[in-house]
Amino acid sequence: MPATTLEPTVKAVPVVLGRVESESKPGKFFEIRLGADDKVYCTCPSWKFHGGATKGCKHTRAFLDTRS
């Protein structure tokens, strides 16, 4: 039986572009991240559960508005 070599898997770590403070919970921040696929992501629940990948969220829009 031939020996099998395992290649280590490298997981891309997203780049944190910035942080946006929650309007409803002062002191809580969400991270705006650039993924390995060059898309912008947010760590807020709205982004995850309400189609952030296609629509974004208010945090990503606020962050991107301050950059332009």
Image (cartoon, rainbow, N blue to C red):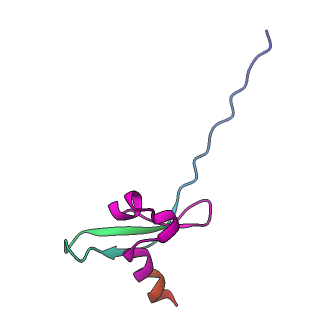
Task: Identify the residue at the far bottom of this view.
Answer: 68
- Location of residue 15 in the rendering, given as x and y in whole percent from the top left corner: 52, 65
Q: Is residue 41 left or right of residue 2?
A: left
- Location of residue 24 in the rendering, given as x and y in whole percent from the top left corner: 20, 74
Closer to the camera, 54 or 36?
A: 54
Q: Is residue 19 left or right of residue 1?
A: left
Q: Is residue 60 left or right of residue 35?
A: left
- Location of residue 48 in the rendering, given as x and y in whole percent from the top left corner: 40, 58
Residue 10 against residue 7 in the figure, above or below: below
Task: Identify the residue at the far right of this view.
Answer: 2
Can residue 67 be seen here?
A: yes
**Going 45% across and 65% down the picture, which residue do you hit?**
52
Residue 26 against residue 54 in the figure, above or below: below
Question: Magenta region: which residues?
Answer: 34-62
Can residue 44 be seen here?
A: no
**Going 34% across and 76% down the picture, which residue do you hit?**
20
Quadrant of the image containing the N terminus? top right
